[in-house]
Amino acid sequence: MTLSLFDQFVSPVLLGIPLIALALLLPWILFPAPSSRWMNSRLLTLQSWFIGRFTNQLLLPINMGGHKWALIFTSLMVFLISLNMLGLLPYTFTPTTQLSMNMGLAVPLWLATVIIGLRNQPAIALAHLLPEGTPTPLIPVLIIIETLSLFIRPLALGVRLTANLTAGHLMMQLIATAAYLLLPLMPAVAILTTALLFLLTLLEIAVAMIQAYVFVLLLSLYLQENV
């Protein structure tokens, strides 16, 4: 049977049970839990420091009304980082390479920010559809363009996360396959290809964290416009 490069993105099934459900449950285990001891462990201290710094940096430019989203944004950040990093391990599956899942995260959160803006400050929320000082003949066209750009936001969130992770995984598989095939033919070139694969793996680790941060950061910017 001929395997395709895209087979790694197919959700695996064991005994009729989709393993994506198990992958989605894993990040919740990594969330720091309060300790009954006087002093926390090094891992818990590091996690708490990272979460505190991230939350402070993310919510700094947002008004006080948006600080209620701190728990949602922080949980989403840890959740996405864990899922993205999960796919870098051998014989694992990356749920965030599925556009349907990413859109399932992006659309409700984006829609919540829009609804909050329309409920709390409808005049300001609708004013975003028409820049100040627009010439009268251009008003209908700009309203249509701004409305389309508003509805494209969740699509951009989901596609950006999916495309970056999918492209990185395909590159890793192509380079790993090339190194495996070149090993008996040209060992020196295979060693150089393996070194390139190692560097690409380090890059993918950075991409996994950066893309999770960008996803949450853009959501916070959308919230900032509506609070």
Image (cartoon, rainbow, N blue to C red):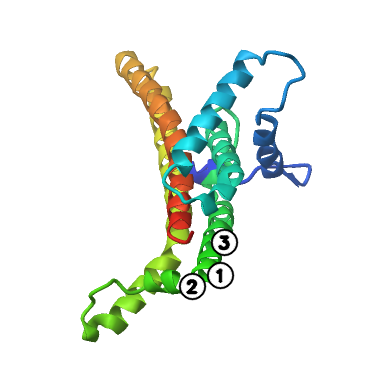
Give the labeled residue for mark 1: 119
Question: Which residue shows up at 63% across the image and 21% down it?
Answer: 44
| Residue 45 screen position, x and y as percent | 60, 19
Give the labeled residue for mark 3: 112
Q: Is residue 215 visible?
A: yes
Identify which residue, 110 or 96, lies in the foreground. 110
Alpha carbon distance from label 1 to label 3: 10 Å
| Residue 146 screen position, x and y as percent | 35, 71
Q: What kind of residue is marked 3? A: Ala
Identify which residue, 115 or 78, lies in the foreground. 115
In the visual, does 137 lie left or right of 79? Answer: left
Mark 1: secondary structure: helix
Q: Quadrant of residue 199?
A: top left
Give yes or no for contact between labels 1 and 3 (Cβ–Cβ under 8 Å). no
Q: Is residue 102 above or below residue 138?
A: above
Mark 3: secondary structure: helix
Q: What kind of residue is marked 1? A: Arg
User: Looking at the image, is mark 1 or mark 3 earlier in the sequence?
Assistant: 3
Question: Which residue shows up at 55% across the image and 64% down it?
Answer: 116
